[in-house]
Image (tube, rainbow, N blue to C red):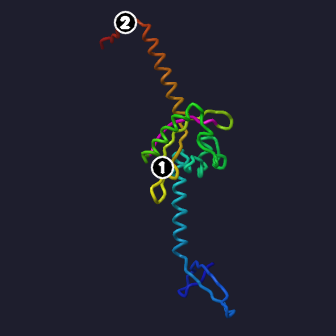
Amino acid sequence: SEHMHKKGHIVPVEISANILPSKQWQALVRDISYRKEAEKKLQYSEQRFRDVSEAAGEYVWELDIDMTYTYATEQSKVVKGYTPEELMGHTPMDFMVKEDIDAVGKIVNAAIANKTSFKLQHRDITPSGEIRWEEVSGTPFYDEAGNVIGLRGTGLNITARIEAEKILHDSEAAFHALSDTLPLAIYVAYGEE
């Protein structure tokens, strides 16, 4: 609710009322301006965080201690091929190429044991069967007692980069194979000016 302050401006308020044993009403009106301002700042901060992660092409995720998604931003559809709703209740391994699971598990388990952040790459399988490379950066997060209660981080689609690196590698390999069949020396002469 809102209330007109005696100085003429509107103030957000919280009103609670109850009936006393004497059948009289008792009401409490509390100014909640500070709470509304804090909520506004939190919403702004959350929107800024979403805007920055989307501008970077990343999605933000959070996993519980069982490695189950509990949060993901909308950008997950672009990076992984799945909406946040499709990720909830699943583990990242449910969408991963089987051959990548053990290596990813070792890196993540080491980060949990050492209480450090991690960075890794793995392949995802989209609903259409397409393979996408994802670069994941993450860190454990803790309860008040210092116990790991989950992981949070970002994921970035690096498929185009991986494919470009493969093309470059294949081109270099072809060049080296060709150069191995050429004469032992190549003489380059420049004409005099």
47 sits to left or right of 88: left
Per the rendered image, the range of residues in magenta is 117-125
Report the front residue among 43 and 22: 22
Residue placed under numbered mark 1 in the picture: 140
How far apart in space, not on screen, are marks 2 and 1 (Cα)?
56 Å
Report whether 187 appears left or right of 82.
Answer: left
Q: Residue 80: give x, y in percent of width and height.
A: 60, 41
Q: Residue at x 55, y 80 (%)?
A: 31
Magenta span contains residue 166? no
Query: Where does the image place residue 75, in percent across and percent down from the top left?
Result: 59, 47
* 102 to 181, vertically: above or below: below
Q: Which residue does the image show at 30% across and 12% down from the upper left?
A: 192
Disc 2 residue type?
A: Leu
Quarter in which the C terminus is drawn: top left
Residue at 53% across, 36% down: 158
Q: Single out the mark in the foreground, 2 or 1.
A: 1
How would you rate the neighbour count of disc 2 (Cα within 10 Å): few for under 14, some for 14-19, many for 20 or more? few
Amino acid at the residue labelled 1 = Pro
Q: Secondary structure at mark 2?
A: loop
Q: Is residue 70 above or below residue 38?
A: above
At 59% from the left edge and 52% from the top edge, which residue is drawn? 71
Q: Earlier in the sequence, mark 2 or mark 1?
A: 1
**Outermost residue to the left:** 192
**Residue bearing mark 2:** 184
In the depicted structure, whether residue 88 falls above or below residue 98: below
- For disc 1, the neighbor class at 10 Å (few under 14, some 14 to 19, many from 20) is many
